[in-house]
Image (spheres, rainbow, N blue to C red):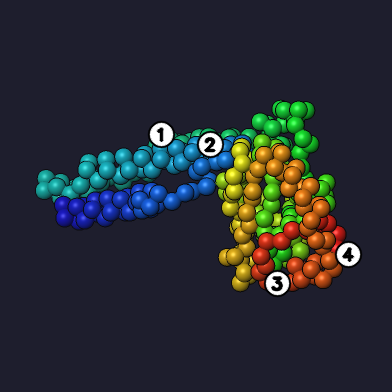
Amino acid sequence: MKPSGRRLRGLFLVVGLSMLALTGCGTGKYIPVLSPQGPVARSEYYLIIWSFVLMIVVVLGVFVIYFYMLVKYRARPENKDYVPPEIEGNSRWESIWTIIPIIIVIALAIPTVAVTYNLVQPPKSAAATTATKETPITIDVISERWKWVFKYPGQNIETVNYVNIPAGQPIDFELSSTGPMNAFWVPALGGMEFAMPSKDLKLWLEADHPGTYDGRSAQFSGRGFANMTFKVNSMTQAQFNAWVQKTQQTAPKLTKQTDDQLQKPGLVSPMTFSSIEPE
């Protein structure tokens, strides 16, 4: 009985520590992926919740079986000399523990494929009303070492380490890299996508309402990786239009010297330019 008691105490300790870790040790820290601020993040949030539910079902099933076996077949004085018979196999139970994992994989795969397929298109909440809204904005995102460059081809504006977007509008981010492969991630607005040299990858994101959201690199790319962060500023359409107009009139042009400096490894402060091609 003593070994079983120690195992039980150890199991309860592991479960307790796991639950404490999941709750953030009671600090109440903001977890962006669990507080979606846009339709893309929301669809991925529901997928996370569904995956978590399936995981809980599996964990509870394992615990129930474990405790059942622990109690039913524990060592007792009346069966201390018991020797289990030789068993070649059990077709029924072998079928059950083969079919159940298949069902779990299917239950996870179907919504995952559906959500992934839908994310290739603009968010439905915005796509359904684009006729009455501004044309979706395309922003070229270039991963440098260790900074993020955002080019607005339609507005002829370039920003570094921050990006402004209108709220309630689908944004077409076209991702590439001039250095090592990287990953672009704004947790509150959606999942990550790779930024690769000589290859353009697309990521649709949208913010429900005005606000500022943290973005970062999600792929280790060298010593400056930890500081490779940026801000996404979501604003009303009127505020965005005013920012575009002011930037086009007052921001300096991108020079060849500045462009060469941006392509060199290093950290820089946020920058704004009124052109996307160096002069």
Reading the image, the residue beneath label 3 is 265
Q: Residues within 10 Å of mark 2 (few under 14, many from 20)?
A: some
Residue 250 pos. (x, y %) = 79, 56
Residue situated in front as seen by the camera: 140 or 69: 140
Reading the image, the residue beneath label 2 is 46
**Alpha-carbon span between mark 2 and mark 4:** 47 Å
Q: Closer to the camera: disc 2 or disc 3?
A: 3
Q: Give the secondary structure at mark 4.
A: loop
**Alpha-carbon span between mark 1 and mark 2:** 35 Å
> Which residue is at 61% across, 38% downward?
209
Residue situated in front as seen by the camera: 38 or 275: 275
Reading the image, the residue beneath label 4 is 279
Left or right of residue 92, residue 247 in this image? right
Residue situated in front as seen by the camera: 19 or 140: 140
Q: Amino acid at mark 1?
A: Arg
Quarter in which the C terminus is drawn: bottom right
Q: Give the secondary structure at mark 2.
A: helix
Q: Amino acid at mark 3?
A: Pro
Q: Quadrant of residue 53?
A: top left
> Which residue is at 82% across, 71% downward?
257
Which mark is on residue 92? 1
Q: Give the secondary structure at mark 1.
A: helix
Residue 23 pos. (x, y %) = 38, 48
Left or right of residue 263, residue 168 in this image? left
Cβ atoms at labels 4 and 1 below 8 Å apart:
no
Residue 185 visible in the picture: no
